[in-house]
Amino acid sequence: MNTNSIAGWGVALALALASTGCDQKKNPEVEQLKTRVAALEKRLDKIEGPIQASAQQDERRKAMQESVNHRFQLDKKKYTQQQMTEIENLYQQVSKTKFGSPECLALVNKLAEQYPDSDRAGCAMLYLAQGTDGPDAEKYFQACIQKFNGCFYGDGVQVGVLARFFLATYYHNNGLQDKAAALFQEIKDKYPDAVDHGGQLLVDQIK
């Protein structure tokens, strides 16, 4: 039974209630109808909830893909095809190294120095930050936020927002609760639709 038929059934029962007259509270049949209507409403809510959630996810995916495409087009306008190929090759080399390793650092620095405005430079910098510990990690996360905020991975993850989430987690784990809270709040206020690489909303992961 689809939602329309369920809703129609609920309306029919409601009309039946109305037709029983003013003394309906004392009528067992009326009480039974009320119970059935209430049950139908709960069932309809359970059905409509996932449908609405799915529609919201579809809208979110569409918006993210538009952002990814827009960012890619900016690079195409700035760099030649040969440069775009070199940028992608450098990025792929970064992704194959151990994050935070000297090799990773060298490749990220090369990419950021030669193509500082490229989307891939931001993505690579976040990889570097994730594989680094201590003050250097904070420095790289800050670079992602300040220099590469508007960069996007192909799956719709925004570099600067995920960097905020990781940096906030770093602050939280190191006893800097005020700094962590400020970054988490910024994500809630400015980037409520931002996701991680698993497609999960970041705001849902903030405790």
Image: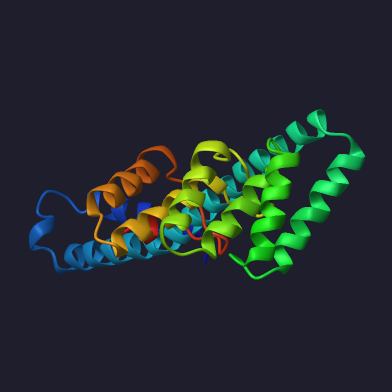
Which residue is at the front of the view, 206 or 181? Answer: 181
Which residue is at the front of the view, 33 or 133? Answer: 133
Quadrant of the drawing holding the C terminus: bottom left
Residue 35 at what x, y percent from top left?
Answer: 23, 66
Which residue is at the front of the view, 101 or 148? Answer: 101
Q: Residue furthest right?
A: 82
Judge whether 189 appears above or below 177 on screen. above
Q: Is residue 163 left or right of residue 182?
A: right
Q: Is residue 194 visible?
A: no
**Residue at image point 71% right, 60% down:** 94
Classify residue 65 by image quadrant: top right
Q: Is residue 45 left or right of residue 102?
A: left
**Residue at image point 15% right, 69% down:** 28
Residue 106 at what x, y percent from top left?
Answer: 69, 56
**Residue at image point 62% right, 67% down:** 101
Q: How many marks?
A: 0
Q: Is residue 121 left or right of residue 180?
A: right
Which residue is at the front of the view, 7 or 193? Answer: 193
Q: Is residue 177 visible?
A: yes
Residue 159 at what x, y percent from top left?
Answer: 56, 48
